[in-house]
Image (spheres, rainbow, N blue to C red):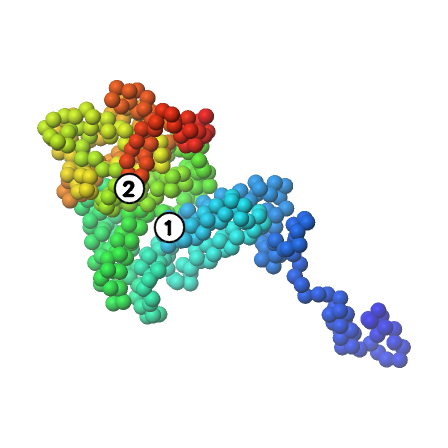
Amino acid sequence: RSIATKLASANEAPDIDDVMDSVNQLLDRSVGTQEYVIRAGGQADPLIDLNQLDFEQLALRFAGNKRTAAKQAEKDLDQRLKQAARKNPTRVDLAERFRKLIDEYNAGTHNLEELLRRLKAISDELTADEQRTVREDLTEAELAIYDLLTKPEPELSPAEQQKVKAAARSLLDHVTEKLVLDWRKRQHTRAAVHVAVGKILDEQLPEVYGPSLFDEKVQQVYEHIYGSYFDDGASVYDEAPASTPPAAPVSTMPSATSEVTEELLAQAKADPVVLAALMEELFGTTEIWFKPTEALLGGEIKHVEYKQSARWSEDDPNEPNKLAEQIIAKTVAGFLNAEGGTLLIGVHDNGTPVGLDDDYRRVQPADADGFVNWLDSMLQNALGHAGAHRVQIRIDVIDGLDVCRVDVPASHKPIYCTFKRKASVLFQRRNNSTREVPVDELDGFLAERFPQDR
């Protein structure tokens, strides 16, 4: 009516300025400033703010099955975070926040809409961090080194930050030349990489890095390189060809051991990238599986066990001991029935390598290949195909001594072991020891550990 009044005046031509003033006054009276929100039925408090919502979230909000949609959003972000943390270990804090959020949601702390809001916040933060490569003028691999060198300390001036960036670039240029075929399997090539990391950082990092902090950063960078650059020349930073997606993309990785197929196991044995994704998805043992063997010598823990021998008595190396090999099988079975882990043979209980020379004398041929073949056959006899074929065995050289590394994933079904003439013994890894599951607790253990097998 304000507009009509102005236009209907016969005594004067329409004044556009006055018209616009009238319109603005009308809008001021009629339209409030409160933002529009979607509210859950029966609830007064806003759950989703449209100002902070993207279309993907909106689709999730109105999906026919909201719980299914939220579960898919959770799974997608989980996979993104795992991939991101593999490429840059400093992102593990984001992954831990995600895990805490899911635990809180499962405990009833948050409703579904709040879960989605917080998932989006973590996703946005991850996206922003991934885009730092442009802002920092670094490749993704260089950014990971830079972050390891600067987080959580030391505090750096802008000039010192530039020096650290230059050190990260230089380090990757020099170190990647030393990543020859099977570099992780040989002690001298691993040592060469470790020395190169220390040398380059010593030459190029600013003086703000004290001796203790410097040594810590060198070890962190070396362990990251060890876990990210594989024996076949591939790395976690390689992009899959657009026309040929990976055999087992992360998005199709199983979320439970019951979903592991024989085909996926075969791919994992042939492709270290698939193995890394599988171990990380199922067992959360990346910190063990992708550490160099030397880094596992700090003491026995739940996921790491030492044995001096698989063939001879610890009291007398000249005396063969059948019990020694049974204890090896028992340890592997315990890892399989728990959360997986790594067994090192040829290492004293105190973490000192003792070598495998006395073991080699009792296999044919009397060398590393003969020992690995014997061990594989022994595990086949003791654990059956279902247990033995999941195990990965290799020989590493530490301080000039051979050490057998046995990486064991968790099994999706119970693995029984032949032990001391008993054909069906069930062992479980607990803390830093392997124990037989008592008969009167067997049903409860199986129901809890292998519910899908009941």
Occupied quadrant, residue 10? bottom right
Is any part of residue 181 visible from this angle?
A: no
Relative to residue 140, is residue 430 depicted above or below?
A: above
Q: In this view, does 96 lie to the left or right of 118?
A: left
- Which numbered disc, 1 or 2, marks the residue closer to the eye? 2
Location of mark 1 (residue): 87
Rendered residue at 28%/41% (across/down): 301
Q: Is residue 188 left or right of residue 275?
A: left
Rendered residue at 27%/26% (across/down): 379
- Determine whether the residue tagged by mark 2 lies in a helix, strand or loop: loop
- x and y percentages locating residue 166 in the rendered image: 30, 63
Q: Which amino acid does label 1 sit on?
A: Lys
Relative to residue 359, is residue 272 depicted above or below?
A: below
Rendered residue at 25%/51% (across/down): 177
Q: Given the current orientation, which residue lies at the most extreme right position? A: 10
Is any part of residue 144 visible from this angle?
A: yes
Rendered residue at 24%/29% (across/down): 327
Relative to residue 321, is residue 12 depicted above or below?
A: below
Q: Is residue 162 left or right of residue 27?
A: left
Occupied quadrant, residue 339? top left
Q: How many C-alpha atoms fall within 10 Å of the one at disc 2: few (<14), some, or many (≥20)?
A: some
- x and y percentages locating residue 390 in the rendered image: 33, 31
Location of mark 2 (residue): 301
- N-term-proximal mark, 1 vs 2: 1
Q: How many C-alpha atoms fall within 10 Å of the one at disc 1: few (<14), some, or many (≥20)?
A: many
- x and y percentages locating residue 208 in the rendered image: 27, 67
Q: Is residue 129 left or right of residue 344?
A: right
